[in-house]
């Protein structure tokens, strides 16, 4: 509004100035006398100024006609490009103006207008590397994917724009869900521009989704060499990829190479819990118990985790409950106040039927962080110390409606996973799972299969004891009907 008003004021001022100047010239005496063929012409001051202006215009027109005449003479003498150059100057001006307008429309989010300007620029300019790029981006913004694909394919013909074409088609295939084709295009794009960070990240994610761990490790190395990835992050993700390549270690058909990859993953990132558990089991398969214990201890010092406790129990599967409590003191002394340490030691003391010590190990966990596992352990302690069934059932009732506690959570989409995985099953993000409590905790399931993972000394390696499903169902029925008499307390078995 102010700008329009300013322009109007300037226009009025110019008109007033011209009128004032014309008035002065009309009142000025004298003028210009011109004699042509004996005839004398006298021009006043105002007429002289107007004549001068007409003379300037006439000279400009004369020079333009002279330029056209020269171009015509050259054309008649065989120079065919002279005439075309003369007319092409105007076409280029129109083309570049349309190109500029199209880029402005694109930046403004006007896809249809940008597409119209791109078509006009393509008619006037012989610059397909510019007009095709504008056409492709404008078509994408306007939702015309077919036209965009055609423009990207034309860009493939020029070596200078080949990367842009490959990348554009790759992004289209990703949006269409064609991951296989997108993976091949990402590999070609990276070969053209090895240091392009976006292509590196896209290729790495696609290779992880396709479980091409060897290829993903090469891409990760390329990111490190190009300086787009810090070394500490590289070591962590390289360990994740090495771990992913060795996930078959728990199978009977696991190869020596898979075992070595599990050990390598743990070497690259000792605090990565899944790598530590697989490496420890690989050492146990080789009969190297001391190495397995060392791996578990180092990982436990970084982050106590139930899987580490299970592997530590597998080191000596035939020991008595008392022997197991004594051996697990090595882990407990590393992180004595950690919640996982308290839970594991409480479980072991319950198995050893030392219920007062189990209560001391559990501490204030049932008040401070009452999840299903802690509350179920408290029910087992009450049962072991001879409390009434009503007390035990009250703890179990709380456990049934309590959150499960820490789980494998994706930091990108907050999706909860039952087991660790290199790629989130919900959002396909790479290396985003971490062991933590969800902000919106998941409630314990009715079966309670995860509620009380008591490590036993007589069962097979990794075995756990959980509340009987029938007992949980009896408890649920008792809550609904308010009937008593069902003994729902879990019994710890050796």
Image (cartoon, grey):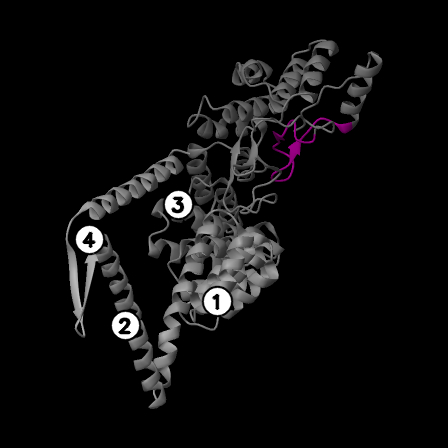
SS at circle 3: helix
Q: Distance between the residues labelled 4 and 1?
A: 51 Å
Residue at horizontal 37 percent and vertical 49 percent from the top: 229
SS at circle 2: helix
User: What stretch of residues is rendered in magenta?
Assistant: 449-469
Residue 461: percent from the left, percent from the top?
A: 61, 40
| Picture quadrant where residue 463 is located | top right
- Tag 1 residue: 122
Q: Earlier in the sequence, mark 2 or mark 4?
A: 4
Instruction: Work out which residue is located at the far front of the displayed protein and give it.
Output: 39
Q: Earlier in the sequence, mark 2 or mark 1?
A: 2
Instruction: Assign the C terminus to one quadrant of the image.
Output: top right
Between residues 480 and 164, which one lies in front from this camera angle?
164
Judged by its main secondary structure, the magenta piece is loop
Residue 94: percent from the left, percent from the top?
A: 42, 63
Residue at horizontal 47 percent and vertical 24 percent from the top: 338
- Tag 4 residue: 45
Say whether residue 187 is visible. Answer: no
Q: Do the residues labelled 4 and 1 touch (CB within 8 Å)?
A: no
Q: How far apart are marks 2 and 3 (CA)?
A: 68 Å
Instruction: Assign the N terminus to one quadrant of the image.
Output: top left
Q: Residue 233 carries which label?
A: 3
- Tag 2 residue: 63
Q: For mark 1, does the 10 Å Cα neighbourhood hold few (<14), some (14 to 19), or many (20 or more) residues?
A: many
Left or right relative to 242: residue 471: right
Mark toward the viewer: 2 or 1: 2
Residue 120: percent from the left, percent from the top?
A: 50, 63
Q: How far apart are marks 1 and 3 (CA)?
A: 46 Å
């Amino acid at each position: 509004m102010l700008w329009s008003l300013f322009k109007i004021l300037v226009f009025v001022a110019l008109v007033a100035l011209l009128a004032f100047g014309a008035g002065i010239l009309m009142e000025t005496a004298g003028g210009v006398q011109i004699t042509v063929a004996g005839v004398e012409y006298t021009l006043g001051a105002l007429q002289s100024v107007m004549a001068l202006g007409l003379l300037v215009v006439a000279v400009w027109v004369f020079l333009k006609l002279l330029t056209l005449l020269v171009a015509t003479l050259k054309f008649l003498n065989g120079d065919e490009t002279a005439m075309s150059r003369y007319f092409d100057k105007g076409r280029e001006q129109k083309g570049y103006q349309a190109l500029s307008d199209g880029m402005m429309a694109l930046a403004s989010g006007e896809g249809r207008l940008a597409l119209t300007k791109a078509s006009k620029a393509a008619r006037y300019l012989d610059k397909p590397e510019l007009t095709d790029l504008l056409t492709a981006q404008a078509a994408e913004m306007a939702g015309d994917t077919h036209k965009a694909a055609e423009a990207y394919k034309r860009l493939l013909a020029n070596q200078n724009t080949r990367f842009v074409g490959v990348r554009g088609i790759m992004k289209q295939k990703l949006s269409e869900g064609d991951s296989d084709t997108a993976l091949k295009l990402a590999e070609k794009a990276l070969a053209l521009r090895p240091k392009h960070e976006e292509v590196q990240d896209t290729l790495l994610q696609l290779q992880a989704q396709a479980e091409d761990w060897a290829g993903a490790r090469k891409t990760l190395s390329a990111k490190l060499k190009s300086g787009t990835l810090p070394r500490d992050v590289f070591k962590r993700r390289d360990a994740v990829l090495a771990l992913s390549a060795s996930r078959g270690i728990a199978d009977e058909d696991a190869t020596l190479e898979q075992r070595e990859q599990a050990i390598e993953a743990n070497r690259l990132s000792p605090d990565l819990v899944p790598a530590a558990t697989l490496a420890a089991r690989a050492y146990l398969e080789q009969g190297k118990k001391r190495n397995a214990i060392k791996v578990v201890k180092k990982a436990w010092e970084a982050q106590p985790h139930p899987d580490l406790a299970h592997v530590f129990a597998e080191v000596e599967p035939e020991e008595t409950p008392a022997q197991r409590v004594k051996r697990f003191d090595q882990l407990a002394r590393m992180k004595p106040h950690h919640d996982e340490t308290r839970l594991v030691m409480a479980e072991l003391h319950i198995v050893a039927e030392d219920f007062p010590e189990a209560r001391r190990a559990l501490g204030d966990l049932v008040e401070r962080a009452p999840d299903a596992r802690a509350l179920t352990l408290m029910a087992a302690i009450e049962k072991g110390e001879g409390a009434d069934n009503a007390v035990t059932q009250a703890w179990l009732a709380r456990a049934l409606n309590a959150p499960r506690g820490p789980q494998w959570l994706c930091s990108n989409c907050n999706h909860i996973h039952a087991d660790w995985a290199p790629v989130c099953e919900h959002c396909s993000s790479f290396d985003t799972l971490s062991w933590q409590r969800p902000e919106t905790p998941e409630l314990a399931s009715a079966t309670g299969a995860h509620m009380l993972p008591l490590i036993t000394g007589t069962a097979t390696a990794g075995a756990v004891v959980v509340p009987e499903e029938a007992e949980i169902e009896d408890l649920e029925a008792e809550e609904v009907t308010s009937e008593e008499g069902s003994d729902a307390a879990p019994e710890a078995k050796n």
